[in-house]
Amino acid sequence: MKNQAVIFDMDGVICHTNPFHSEAFKVFFGKRGLNPTEEEFENHMYGKSNKYIFKHFLGREIVGEEFISLENEKEGLFREIYADKIITLPEFLPFLETLKNDGFRTGVATSAPRANLDLIMGALKFAPKMESILASENVKNHKPDPEVYLTSAKLLDVNPENCLVFEDSFSGVTAAINAGMKVVGVLSSHKQEELPPCQLYINDYTEINLETVRELMS
């Protein structure tokens, strides 16, 4: 096995879930008399933790049992909406298979709750190919803090500079850069100019291959 790793965010990177999160949040906030615009979601929802999202849109810090209750409500709505619509970005699974066949260690590092990750992994069956699996419950500090990526590197037993991260959000790319890792920006949710500088940008996995990954890691 190589002493190199490829780490994937989930929302917007493995699956294009953001439209379904928007749908769930519209229902969630609608019950509370709020109607955020798509632009507000782009700026304050995509790639952000629920703690940040609730604070921004509800106008106060949500903690303790109230946070757990609200998160369960919103994420339950998301899973209900998304459960029968789970598909990857084009060619993700073949790309992952290519990486594994070449000996790369691989992980997933998401700000989403583990229940969402389990729903997606259960449908797509890629969990056995991941040597590291981290969700929001596994870290204290969420992206753009580098904790989730530094923890991934430890679990993968690979130095951060030998890790390549696939991310789609400003906070996620920033977290990977802060961890000292190379980054491929996935343009599912944002335009290139809306993200921090990455080593490469792709729309989906038809635009990258093993040779490109090797070049980026060299």
Image (tube, grey):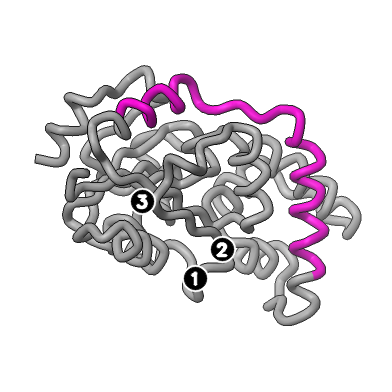
Which quadrant of the structure image shows residue 155?
Answer: bottom left
Measuring from the top left, give residue 5's x and y in whole percent: 26, 47
Q: Which residue is painted at 47% across and 54% down in the image?
A: 133
Q: Check disc 3 and report its element: helix, strand or loop.
A: helix
Q: Name the kind of residue labelled 1 in the image.
A: Val
Q: What's drawn in magenta, residue-wise? A: 69-98
| Residue annotated with mark 2 | 136
Whether residue 85 appears in this view of the structure is yes
Q: Check disc 1 and report its element: helix, strand or loop.
A: loop
Specify the label residue 50 is tagged with: none
Compare residues 51 and 60 and report the one nearer the observer. 51
In the rendered image, the quadrant that contains the C terminus is top left
| Residue annotated with mark 3 | 173
Nearer the observer: mark 2 or 3; the answer is: 2
Question: Seen in the image, is 79 located left or right of residue 168?
Answer: right
Residue lying furthest bottom in this view? 64
